[in-house]
Image: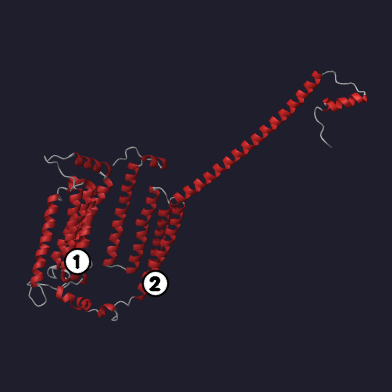
Amino acid sequence: MSRIRPDYEMTKWRRFQRFVNGEELPEDERKRQEFLHAAREKSARREEEQAAFFLRQKEERASFRKYWKEQERRELERALKERENWADTKGVKLFRRFYHAVSIIICISVIAVLLAVVAELPAFGSGGTPANGNEVAERYIVKGQEETGAVNIVTGMILDYRAFDTLGESHVLFIAACTVLILLRIDHGADGRPTQAKLEAEEDDRQFEPKNDRILQKTAFFLVPCIIIFGIYVILNGHISPGGGFSGGAIIGAGLILHLNAFGFRKTERFFTYRVFQTVTLCSLLFYSAAKCYSFYCGANHLESGIPLGTPGSILSSGLILPLNICVGCVVACTMYTFYAIFRKGGI
Amino acid sequence: MEWLRFITGGACILFGLAVACISVIGNFKFKYVLNRMHAAAMNDTLGILFVLLGLIVINGWNFTSLKLFIIICFFWMASPVTAHLVARLEVVTDRERVEKECEVAEDVRL
């Protein structure tokens, strides 16, 4: 059906038709104009509304698009950030899992290798050991006791055949102690009074170390002599039983450190000062060097050194090994104690 | 007699190892210092006591057994004192946490 104009009733043709049909005509022009105006307004309003609707739709669509874009951008940013922080979040988790797995694998393989080696070892005392083919080892084993006088062949090796090496090791210890002293020692001021740094270090020491702990003191009262005596035993029996200067010295040093922990610097300084450290270490190293110089020149295979070897197995035997053991023990004990004291307070 | 001695010693060693295992597990399981210290100290005293006791029983009476006995004495003296010092340091340095966990005497100082 074709659409009828809104002002159809007012058109000329309609009016003419009515006139022909004998219908009554509209009262006047004014009414027609009003009607026209109203109709026009109505359509205009509808158009306006339609335009507004379209505009709104457009805006909405734009904002929607904008929102999506924003969302996409955010997503992208998050992905980028995740990728940037990958090492801190996912990477750590992954690394931890990897670390656990690898550590377990390494542990198991090390255990397996060690067990396999133990299973492959030749029986104790059997003649077919690989060491028996090596002439150096054979000489050490066969002639060691006769030539050095030490029952403990290892000590005979490190303090007689290879004493030069051990001398170097003792000097390394001494140099290490010197270096730590240079780096960490907090000295008196130029006028002999303690500087601010020294006072601060002592204050710090007072705050965090055990002070006048009755339990510790009573225990240390019993333990320190035992530990030091055990250390001396280890040193003096170095050529008879397992042990020697390094291990015994470490034990004595531990005893000294325990004494220092229990009774404080004031008690320890009564017998162990910086001067004592200097004297003991220097005397030991000098004696070691001198003794070894002598035996390098006069202790070779076909020369008489004049140092009695004694009967193997007794304490006073095996020539120079016992005094050298004592020297090494002194150096090691002093060095250990010095390290501890310097790290704790910046001075002995 | 020989068998009896071996079985007793083996049982002692196994019990000591079990204690050591429990202490290791506890050491990793607990989160707080004092709890972990308790677990660790158990190994140092009870575990070592039973392992060395088993060795002494298997070895019989001689000089080596005396040495082992001295080691037991040393550990039973040294380990509790060490634990005491560590606990004391913990109380001094992190008092609030300790008070949250247990009662603390007023005059604990270094």
Residue A225 visible in the shown view: no
Task: Give the residue number, with chain letter if any, for mark 2.
Answer: B3
* Amino acid type for the residue under numbered disc 1: Gly
> Quarter of the image holding residue A223?
bottom left
Q: Nearer the viewer, residue A346 or A273?
A: A346
User: x, y (%) of residue A163?
Assistant: 16, 68
Q: Give the foreground label among 1 and 2.
A: 1
- In this orientation, does residue A67 appear? yes
| Residue located 56% across and 43% down the image | A69
Location of residue A176 (image quadrant): bottom left
Between residues A19 and B67, which one lies in front from this camera angle? A19
Rendered-image quadrant of the N terminus of chain B = bottom left
Quarter of the picture containing the C terminus of chain B is top left
x and y, in percent, of residue A267 in the image: 18, 46
Which circle marks residue A238 in the picture? 1
- Please tell me how crowded label 2 is: few (under 14), some (14-19), or many (20+) other residues with Cα within 10 Å: few
Mark 2: which amino acid?
Trp
Residue at 30% from the left image edge and 40% from the top image edge:
B109
Look at the numbered disc 2 and give the secondary structure of its residue: helix
